[in-house]
Amino acid sequence: MNKEKVIDRVQQYWLLARFDKPIGILILLWPALWALWVASSGQPDILVLTVICSGVVLMRAAGCVINDYADRDFDPHVARTKLRPIAAGKVKPKEALVVFAVLCLSAFALVLLLNRYTIMLSFGGAFLAASYPFMKRYTQLPQAYLGIAFGWAVPMSFAAQSNEIPLIAWLMYLATALWALVYDTMYAMVDKEDDLKIGVKSTAILFGDKEREIMAVLQIIVMLLLVQIGYLEGLSWIYYVSLFCASGFFVYQQKLIFYREKNDCFKAFLNSNWFGLTIFIGLVLEYAF
């Protein structure tokens, strides 16, 4: 294989893993960092921090690869996804499976540096990541399943840092899962018309004309859970100020999706990054001062 072909393969695998679109990494990373900061009272172990962050990057990439493999018959019929490497015929399905395996094994190799509890939890995380893409065939709630998968970084972070998963970790896990359900429903609203045509299930379809109201209720529940975490942890006004600021992004997202315009729904999804970042900044400042 000549140099040009090698470069082309690397580029296609890079696009397949969606390293060119880091938003997925960020919204998966923020809850993991919330968990690490709370579990360590703002002083996470450097090895744990490095492994968790690297694992998030690798497993998000693996999730994208297996998602495109699972959707290889659907993506060519959806405007937003028809140019993805597998859908466009630039990467063969068998190649994608090899890339997926390499990414998963790399992440597992990193997890082996942590305690036994975290290693055991990693099997659950791998199963969730690998099975999620197929859920849209069997359930109207694939976005809820994504939340369960994305939130798994929270108990893993607690286990890695403190070798336990206290109640506060499960509250954070629930908040993360519901948050993911909200932002992935916004994402699904972009593809709603195409999904209806090809028979793909989603919460954007399930919720119908009430999706904005349902997401607003879920957002309120997320905020209440985060408030409860602050109360149980005994956090100060700094944390609650960050929650107040973060809630402003929820309000802005509701404004964006009000008319259900595709571009605005996608902007609302992208805006979720700032919600996660704001809470993380609040936790960093809380434990620093």
Image (cartoon, rainbow, N blue to C red):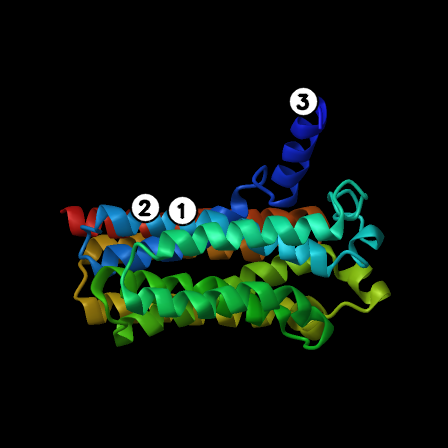
Q: Residue at x 49, y 49 (%)?
A: 58
Q: Residue at x 69, y 54 (%)?
A: 68
Image-quadrant location for residue 66: bottom right
Q: Residue at x 49, y 54 (%)?
A: 105
101 over 6 or under it: above or below: below
Residue 77, image x, y percentages? 84, 54
Mark 2 and mark 3 lie on one chain; the one further toward the N terminus is: 3
Whether pointer 2 and pointer 1 mark residues with C-beta atoms closer than 8 Å, the reply is yes
Residue 6 to residue 90: above or below: above
Q: Is 93 or 220 nearer to us in this picture?
A: 93
In the structure shown, which secondary structural element does the residue marked by tag 2 occupy?
helix
Alpha-carbon distance for marks 3 and 1?
28 Å
Q: Quick one: label 3 or label 1, which is nearer the N terminus?
A: 3
Is the residue marked by circle 2 packed among few (<14), some (14-19), or many (20+) residues within 10 Å?
A: few
Which one is nearer the viewer's eye here, 199 or 114? 114
Q: Amino acid at mark 1?
A: Ser
Which residue corresponds to mark 1? 54
Q: Mark 2 to mark 1: distance in Å?
A: 6 Å
Q: Which numbered dot is residue 50?
A: 2
Q: From the image, which quarter does the N terminus lie in?
A: top right
Kindly identify which residue carries mark 3: 3
94, above or below 209, in the image:
above
Q: Point out the residue furthest to the left here.
A: 289
Mark 1, Cα crowd under 10 Å, few <14 / some 14-19 / many 20+, is: some
Q: Position of residue 28 (x, y in %)?
A: 46, 54
Spot occupied by residue 43 in the image (x, y as percentages of width and height): 18, 50
Q: Nearer the viewer, mark 2 or mark 3?
A: 3
